[in-house]
Image (tube, rainbow, N blue to C red):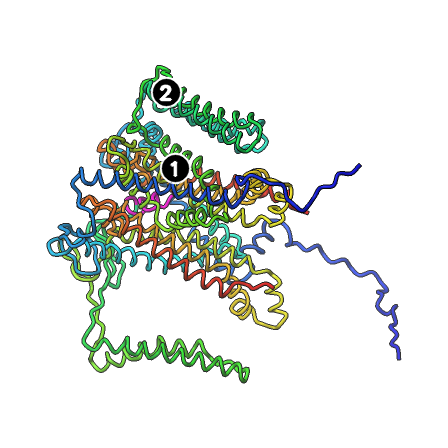
Amino acid sequence: MQTVVSQTSPPKKSFLYDPKVRGVFYQVLLVAVVGYLFYVAATNAIENLQRAKIASGFGFLENTAGFDISQSLIPFSAAGSTYGDAFLVGLLNTLIVSAIGIFFTTILGFLIGIARLSTNWMVAKVAMVYVEALRNVPLLVQLLFWYIAVLGPLPQPRNSLEMGAGFFLNSRGFFMPRPVYAADAWAIPAVLAIGLVGAFVYRRWAKTQQEKTGRQSPVGLVTLGLVVGLPVVTWIVLTLAGANPIGFDLPKKGTFNLTGGMQILPEFVALLLGLTTYTAAFIAEVVRAGILAVSKGQTEAASSLGLKSGQTLRLVVIPQAMRVIIPPLTSQYLNLTKNSSLAVAIGYPDLVQVFMGTVLNQTGQAIEVVVITMGVYLTISLVTSAVMNIYNRRVAIVER
Amino acid sequence: MSTTVDMPRFVRAKQEEALPPPNLTRGPIAWARENLFSGPFNTVLTLVVLYLLYVSIPPLVRFLFVDAVWSGTDRAACRADMGGNEAGACWAFIREKLGYFTYGSYPISQRWRVDIFFALLGLGVGWLLWLRAPRRDLGAIYFFWLFPIFSYILLTGGNANFSSRFWIGFLIFGALLIALFAFVAAILKTSLRPALIIGGGIVAVVGITLGLMSIDFGLSPVPTALWGGILVTLLVATVGIVCSLPFGILLALGRRSKLPIVRMASVVFIEFVRGVPLITVLIMANTMLPLFLPGDITVDRLLRPLIGTALFSSAYMAEVVRGGLQAMPKGQYEGAMSLGLNYPQMMVLIILPQALRIVIPGIVNTFIGLFKDTSLVSIVGIFDVVKTIEASRIDPNWAAPNIGLTGYAFAALFYFIFCFGMSRYSLGVERRLAAGQKR
């Protein structure tokens, strides 16, 4: 015997089984819980702030700071500057240590990453030991190591270590010659700009020429000449003409301290050393993975086309490796920028140390200070990842 | 036209003398030639590296071992001007302060409790990490439920005094919860038994936990302000790891969810937390958590950074888990749906086991990062390993020029052993999993 199931009317089911209803229910629940938490937190915060008699709002940024900062790129004084200025000083200090750190760590990281792939056994092993040792020790310990154990015991200014050419190292930091610009120094950056534009135009012309005729022009040499040669020649000519556009103010040893020159704080040196060597270990791994990701067939195909090994590297391997390297490399740059906040442990006046440390303690306006500081880092992160996503979409391999 | 080849012409008529064996394809000299001196450039590189090693290794060995001071009770042993030797590391300092580095200011008579905590932690970690250990499901229950309760009782002294009003409230709440489950079961017209078991189970687990916490075992209470050193470092790391995995999985599922509000909330949380440095999260937890709570509730000073690290590592864990979820072929989802599994069943039984297995290396990497990041709690004033070393370094009784170096060498060694061990373990797991994928 057969039972026939009618297909015309589906069995009636409770609306509780409807995925749409469940979805709406879960989302309403989430909104209600999060909203309730925010409401409770906000009312408590208002109550607590009133009890502690702390004003709210961003008006405190106009108040006089009343503390000094050991290093600032813009004029800052305890008497005249506001908390807003302090914020700017901290932000600039964070950006400058990040920018210089990114520059050096890229060079070091690429060197070590390539060294790990070297056919020379000893070079590869030394690079591996470097990576393993630096990756597995917290950055904070490394920073304290550089600051307290290495830079701490340096001699007093009187017994500074001389490194020649006006470079000195002592317990007050690193001293180097400070360039002094004369009135006609503007000529050099102007010539540099002309050289850059010229190089750019020449590159475009060389490319179209190659596409038309197949002839390659000496792009590298001409670019070098325009960008480096032209300003140097200008400098020499100006000096010979007796104008001396850039002079150097050398640090001189006094009785108690060095005078003149440019002083770089030991905190800055320690932070830069720590950030650079630590991040380089990670960049080395990124670079190694990127180069290994280019399949051997690509190299073989290039040499079967008759490319020289230098051309293979420049035209075939590196462009493909970069596609793999750039996204994780950017996150390492971001990590370096975020890790520069550890400056607070050794007293370099970065954003966190100045703003989240001193300003927060003085004003007690925790919410505003935390919101501003986190907003800065968040903006840097989000902008970077947005730019990265655009880049990624442009270079990603498009499959079917 | 055809070409004929006169074959015999290519066959030798007489025996040729055998070539001597290649004398330099095996053995250390051949190896060195191949790997160290294969060309002028490589030779120069090798020599440069050898020189660098010559410059750096002997002084390091001399500092750490040969010239090191191994015994002594105060700075006299490590200062040249007091008849000691300051050329090397001052291991006597580490030996003298080891108790402080391990337990912080935990009362000396009570330190056996911390030792038991270490042993219990080792037991749980070993049980879960040793892949052929018996009954690893029991191990998970032990590690995620019993072990936290035992540790709480051991370290704080337990004896949390809940008022009788609290217990009455708990009983009413529990009864309501079971009733709710039964009510839902009745509406859905399913059998009542699983609902009662689940509801009763939740109430029982919470009840047993609270009950154990309130029993007086006669242990003297030790406030968290006295905890320190390796104890605190391991505690922060363990709490971070235990919390970040489940929260991270939830966030990753939320981010992959089809429900727009759930997805938005997860994305905002993950991107917000990942976009800021950990130190700002810790400072925020430290200064703002008390602001957001009612005035009469105080949060323990150790608990605040714990919450901060747990939030922070969950966001990172979520991205790792998301990678695993994205790597799952669509067929796995479709297969699960075709079996008629609902969403939780599909995730728990089919997707997550496979997805998590794929990303074990990523998970361990996040753990390593978390373990290193625990050192940042020292910045907000928690006495972890780094902070205890900082505090001992400025002890006037041990004022000597090489104390700082020795202290940080010890800290580096401590972190290195743990992190390197974890990374080797993850490599081992990866290799073992890859063995199953090989054809």
Q: Chain of mark 1?
A: B
* Foreground label between 2 and 1: 2
Q: Quadrant of the C terminus of chain A?
A: bottom right
| Residue A142 is covered by the magenta coloring | yes
- Magenta part of the chain: A137-149
- Dot 2 falls on a residue whose secondary structure is helix
Nearest to N terminus: mark 2 or mark 1:
1
Separation (CA) of disc 2 from disc 1: 60 Å
- Amino acid beneath label 2: Trp
Q: Quadrant of the N terminus of chain A?
A: top right
Expressed as whole percent of the image width and height from the top left, the position of residue A104 reads 37, 59
- Dot 1 falls on a residue whose secondary structure is helix
Left or right side of A241 for A375: right
Q: Please name whichever residue, A147 or A375, is drawn nearer the observer in this view of the structure.
A: A375
Pointer 1 local density, CA inside 10 Å: few below 14, some 14–19, many at least 20: some
- Amino acid beneath label 1: Phe
Let me know if marks 2 and 1 both belong to one chain: yes
Which of the 4 image quarters holds residue B14? bottom right
Residue that badge 1 annotates: B65
- Residue B167's label in the rendered image is 2
The residue at the point 86 percent across, 64 percent down is B13
Q: Please name whichever residue, A249 or B27, is drawn nearer the observer in this view of the structure.
A: A249
